């Protein structure tokens, strides 16, 4: 999923898990403005919420990976209609 940055270094979004996301077991968030990699890596924090109660329901196998600069992959046992809340920050090493 292609998303736009909130500002130059911070990113945040809520995404409702679709049937296709749940079947695939992962959602990829692409924060790059173009197809080129961002200059900096990202570090992300993720919480998965139950759709109706908004209770945190992070799956035990939740994994956050960074396939390339500007891209965050959230994987695990995702349930349709749950909500992924993701906040990412650019990291300058």
Image (cartoon, grey):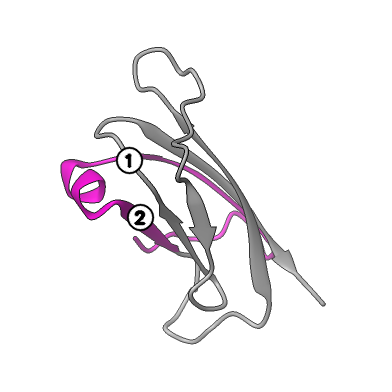
Q: Are marks 2 and 1 in contact (CB under 8 Å)?
A: yes
Furthest residue in direction top, as rendered: 53
Residue 3 forms part of the magenta stretch: yes
Vertical position of residue 45 compared to residue 55: above or below: below
- What residue range appears in magenta? 1-29
Residue drawn at x 29%, y 34% as measured from the top left: 79
In which quadrant will I find the C terminus? bottom right
- Residue for badge 2: 27
The tag earlier along the polypeptide, 2 or 1, is: 2
Location of residue 2 with respect to 41 vertically, above or below: above
Q: Is residue 74 left or right of residue 18?
A: right
Seen in the image, is 16 located left or right of residue 92? left
Outermost residue to the front: 60
Q: Secondary structure at mark 2?
A: strand
Horizontal and vertical percent position of residue 25 = 29, 51
Question: Residue tagged by mark 1?
Answer: 78
Q: Residue at x 70, y 66 (%)?
A: 90
């Amino acid at each position: 999923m292609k998303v736009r940055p909130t500002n130059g270094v911070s990113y945040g979004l809520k995404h409702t898990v679709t049937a296709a996301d749940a079947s695939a077991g992962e959602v990829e968030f692409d924060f790059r403005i173009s197809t080129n990699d961002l200059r900096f890596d990202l570090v992300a924090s993720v919480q998965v919420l139950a759709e109706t109660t908004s209770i945190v329901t992070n799956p035990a196998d939740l994994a956050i990976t960074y396939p390339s600069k500007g891209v965050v992959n959230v994987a695990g046992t995702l349930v349709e209609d749950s909500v992924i809340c993701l906040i990412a920050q650019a990291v300058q090493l």
